[in-house]
Image (cartoon, rainbow, N blue to C red):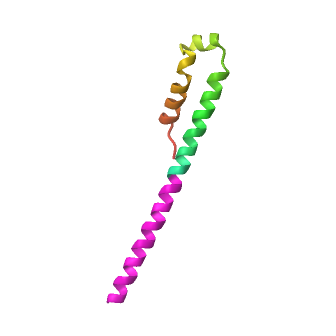
Amino acid sequence: MAYYNEITRRSDLVERTFETIADYFHTAAARHAKRRIYKTTLGELSALGNRDLADLGINRSEIKRLAWEAAEKAKVD
């Protein structure tokens, strides 16, 4: 019986370790996806002229904030 408990404990440790590693890679992938959305949005808005931005009601100083908000609101899974 003690041998069985020892195996169970090791199994739990291995399971938790793999779970932690999987969570790490999931978080890294989500951050990468959000960063890609941020950079894409930033590039697209930066490429617009002042007149186009004014038509959209955006000031050039707001571009970084808007790109960050777009990345944060994006559903990344």
Give the answer, above or below, for where 13 lies relative to 50.
below
> Which residue is at 57% across, 45% downward?
32
Q: Residue furthest left?
A: 1
Q: Quadrant of the N terminus?
A: bottom left
Give the percent coordinates (x, y) of residue 57.
Answer: 53, 13
> Which residue is at 50% across, 56% downward?
24
Number of callouts:
0
> Which residue is at 55% across, 40% downward?
34
Give the answer, above or below, for where 56 lies relative to 44.
above
Snapshot quadrant of residue 54 = top right
Instruction: Give, as a single range, the part of the protein colored magenta.
Output: 1-26
Give the percent coordinates (x, y) of residue 52.
Answer: 63, 13
Give the percent coordinates (x, y) of residue 59.
Answer: 55, 15
In magenta stretch: residue 5 = yes
Snapshot quadrant of residue 56 = top right
Q: Is 13 left or right of 24, judged from the image as shown?
A: left
